[in-house]
């Protein structure tokens, strides 16, 4: 069977050695008319290419990282397996779908194991105790669980040197900043810690960790088989979709969650291609089928049949949506506040989860044990319409507090189920009000609880599609779909009036992490005018005469010179260039003073606390090159120049963005690069079928349209001699459209 370079997928994670320099050179050949590739060749000169030192790199173009012998053998087996699969399948899309199915099954199995472990952990903790010891156990076991969670974090960071990714927020960061690199050992510790936190009574859910574990499964499998960045990220997303689909038995929700929150938060939502979207669907289906195989057909909650909502009901659903938006935004702020307080708390990090758990246990012992754990029993009671509004009102606020303590202190688990708990309580309260006003004409309390769950989730995450799809999948009841859609959309609008972002984005920002597609706005919003303002030059008084005006304007380089009144407040400015033109045309009278020569347009002022984004808008309105920075009494304290603002924007935004032809993953260049206009650059390793043949013999440009940009052998960059034969293990860089690259692969 002919040898063949890596799959339609992409190359493995970069080696730890960092960037490996190289250069490229190429030129058009005379056999063919210029193509779009030719117009982009100049961009390739900034390219850096990894070197291949020996045939151990022929799996997927990358040398194996320095590590133990067993690990190197394991990596080689994975690369060889991935290459063999690519050779057999010979089709991009089929290969990707197969990988997505494997990821979905594995993620579904991992989610099932997590659920079984959580059930076992529940048996080990509070579920087995009662009677006289009950209150002592309610306080003690959460603390023990917190100590165990802290110990696991310490184990991961200090001994195993792995990076934990506890929930979707960590996956978003990994996709946006680290090319989707996730550690398998971190996923194992995450699963163990989630069972400990939930089983000991921590107020958190397993859905977020299921997403993170599924993403890690996709990352590990794709790295093992040698997929490159774009395919690697697709497999991470497939793991997310498969993990959530298995956890909730809701495949559509798994897909929508990944698109709306994970990819929407990390790559700006640009996922509308077959190479990314189709794997999510395949993995979600595979994860759900795997969950069915483990647990049998099931639903997360037992739901009664609801009657249709009346027109009067929609008035109360409107009230519910507004309240859900406020409460969802408030819950996000509570979690962020708790995280911030625990970060600055001066005590060993491994003790912080125990401190948060102590607070949870005390409140549960003093008020209600229904505050412990995810709260599925309470949610089920609300959906059955049996949760009293008095109890619901008490549990609503306290559940937010205990969730903030659990998540904020570093406990494993996420707020997915707790926010549904809070929403169900809110819906029960509004349902009681609706029945008080409308009597039996009101829709059932369970329907209000269901809409409250979706709307509060939308308010917390600022993602309305996920709860709409998820809850409709769970109920399959058209009687609630209209109130659910209305509630989620309105709650989103209300939440955005309070918080600019949803919880996951807020968590990233609180850690100082700015995603690439947000960098432009965030840099200018975070910067302040005081950071760029300069000490003001000499100013003029309103009564300054022409000789003084001329002198000051010349010293200012004919720029803007500001005019102040008797109290030092800025009242106007004189444009030196305009003044010079007017003097040349004889428009200035000898007795003119500064008051007469000030600009006629309204004066734009800046404060030192203004953001740089606001300053850019001010410059756009004022059409001036320099603006005054004043205090609250309008006294001049500095000036801001348009050029300095543009330079700052260029350095902090444009300068830090990735170059078109240099897409990096963890500090090393990726193996498939976009050159624009549909052209990609791909490096391939010469196999047995190409070995011994020259570039002229292959005639890649004439037969397929691809352009050979670089040829390297080991550490040596080869001259592009069309008559020199290739050797097995050489690396060539090809540029062309994807269909042309695929056609070239068929020649392998």
Image (tube, rainbow, N blue to C red):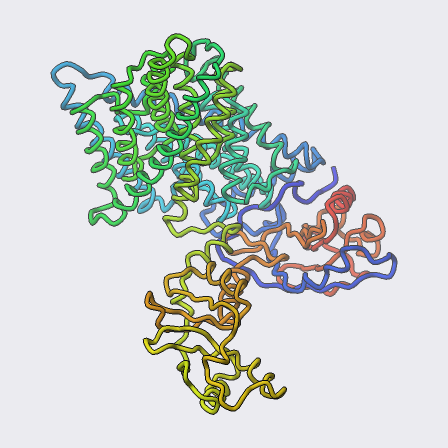
Instruction: Tell whether 367 sits left or right of 543.
Output: left
Residue displayed at 60% across by 39% down: 271
- Does residue 477 sit above or below 177 in this rendering? above
Q: Is residue 666 above or below residue 499?
A: below
User: Percent from the top left, x then y, of residue 575?
Assistant: 52, 78
| Residue toward you, 736 or 90 | 736
Which of the two residues, 657 or 721, is positioned nearer the viewer here?
Answer: 657
Q: Is residue 348 above or below residue 581?
A: above
| Viewer can see residue 637 | no
Please state the horizontal and vertical placement of residue 381, each as a whole percent of the image: 33, 14
At horizontal 20% and vertical 33% (from top left) the residue drawn is 359
Q: Give the farthest residue toward the left.
A: 132
Count of all numbered marks drawn on residues in the image: 0
Q: Does any portion of residue 512 appear in the rendered image?
A: yes
Task: Locate the C terminus by quadrant.
Answer: top right
Which residue is depicted at the point 52% across and 24% down?
Answer: 469
Residue drawn 37% across the image and 33% down it = 328
**How far across and down, in percent of the image, does residue 150 sit?**
26, 39
Residue 243 against residue 748 in the figure, above or below: above
The image quarter in which residue 10 lies: top right
């Amino acid at each position: 069977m002919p040898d063949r370079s890596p799959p339609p997928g992409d190359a493995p994670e970069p080696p730890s050695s960092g960037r490996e320099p190289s250069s490229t050179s190429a030129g058009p050949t005379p056999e063919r008319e210029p193509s779009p590739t030719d117009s982009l060749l100049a961009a390739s000169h900034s390219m850096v290419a990894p070197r291949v030192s020996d045939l151990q790199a022929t799996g997927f173009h990358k040398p194996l990282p320095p590590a133990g012998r067993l690990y190197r053998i394991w990596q080689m087996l994975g690369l060889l397996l991935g290459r063999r699969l690519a050779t057999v399948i010979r089709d991009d899309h089929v290969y990707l779908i197969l990988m997505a199915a494997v990821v979905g099954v594995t993620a579904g199995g991992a989610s099932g194991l997590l659920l079984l472990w959580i059930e076992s952990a529940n048996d080990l903790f509070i579920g087995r105790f009662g009677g006289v010891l009950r209150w002592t156990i309610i306080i003690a076991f959460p603390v023990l669980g917190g100590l165990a969670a802290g110990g696991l974090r310490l184990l991961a960071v200090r001994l195993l040197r792995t990076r934990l990714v506890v929930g979707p927020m960590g996956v978003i960061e990994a996709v946006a900043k680290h090319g989707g690199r996730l550690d398998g050992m971190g996923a194992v510790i995450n699963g163990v810690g989630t069972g400990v936190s939930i089983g000991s009574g921590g107020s958190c859910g397993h859905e977020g960790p299921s997403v993170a574990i599924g993403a890690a499964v996709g990352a590990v499998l794709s790295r093992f088989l040698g997929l490159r960045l774009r395919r690697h990220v697709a497999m991470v997303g497939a793991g997310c979709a498969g993990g959530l689909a298995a956890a909730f038995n809701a495949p559509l929700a798994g897909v929508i969650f990944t698109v709306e929150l994970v990819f929407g938060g990390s790559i700006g939502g640009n996922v509308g291609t077959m190479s990314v979207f189709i794997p999510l669907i395949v993995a979600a289906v595979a994860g759900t089928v795997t969950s069915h195989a483990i647990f049998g057909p099931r639903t997360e909650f037992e739901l009664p049949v609801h009657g249709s909502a009346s027109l009067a009901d929609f008035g109360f659903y409107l009230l519910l949506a507004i309240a859900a938006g406020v409460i969802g935004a408030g819950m996000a702020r509570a979690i962020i506040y708790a995280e911030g307080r625990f970060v600055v708390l001066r005590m060993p990090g491994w003790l912080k989860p125990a401190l948060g758990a102590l607070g949870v246990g005390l409140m549960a012992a003093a008020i209600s044990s229904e505050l412990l754990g995810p709260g599925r029993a309470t949610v089920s009671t609300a959906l059955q319409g049996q949760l009293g509004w008095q109890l619901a009102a008490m549990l609503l606020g306290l559940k937010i507090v205990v969730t903030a303590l659990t998540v904020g202190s570093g406990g494993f688990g996420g707020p997915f189920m707790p926010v549904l708990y809070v929403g169900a309580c809110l819906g029960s309260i509004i349902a009681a009000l609706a029945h008080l006003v409308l009597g039996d004409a009101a829709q059932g309390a369970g329907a209000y609880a269901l809409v409250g769950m979706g709307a509060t989730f939308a308010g917390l995450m600022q993602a309305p599609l996920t709860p709409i799809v998820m809850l409709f999948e769970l109920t399959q009841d058209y009687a609630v779909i209209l109130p659910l859609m209305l509630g989620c959309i309105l709650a989103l609008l209300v939440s955005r009036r309070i918080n600019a972002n949803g919880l996951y984005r807020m968590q990233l920002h609180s850690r100082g992490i700015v995603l690439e597609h947000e960098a432009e706005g965030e840099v200018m919003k975070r910067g302040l005018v005081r950071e760029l303002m300069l000490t003001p030059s000499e100013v003029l008084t309103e009564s300054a005469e022409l000789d003084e005006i001329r002198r000051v304007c010349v010293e200012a380089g004919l720029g803007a010179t500001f005019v102040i009144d008797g109290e030092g407040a800025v009242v106007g400015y004189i444009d030196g260039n305009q003044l010079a033109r007017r003097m040349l045309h004889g428009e200035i009278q000898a007795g003119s003073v500064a008051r007469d020569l000030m600009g006629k347009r309204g004066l734009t002022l800046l404060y030192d606390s203004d953001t740089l984004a606001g300053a850019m808008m001010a410059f756009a309105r004022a059409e001036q090159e320099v603006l005054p920075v004043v205090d609250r009494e309008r006294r001049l304290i500095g000036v801001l120049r348009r050029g300095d603002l543009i330079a700052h924007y260029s350095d902090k935004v444009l300068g830090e963005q990735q170059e078109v032809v240099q897409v990096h993953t963890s500090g090393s260049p990726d193996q498939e690069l976009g050159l624009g206009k549909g052209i990609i650059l791909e490096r391939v390793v010469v196999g047995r079928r190409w070995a011994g043949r020259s570039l002229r013999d292959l005639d890649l440009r004439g037969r397929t349209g691809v352009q050979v940009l670089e040829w390297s052998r080991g550490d040596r960059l080869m001259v592009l001699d069309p008559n020199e034969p290739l050797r097995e293990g050489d690396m060539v860089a090809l540029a062309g459209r994807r269909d042309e690259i695929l056609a070239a692969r068929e020649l392998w």
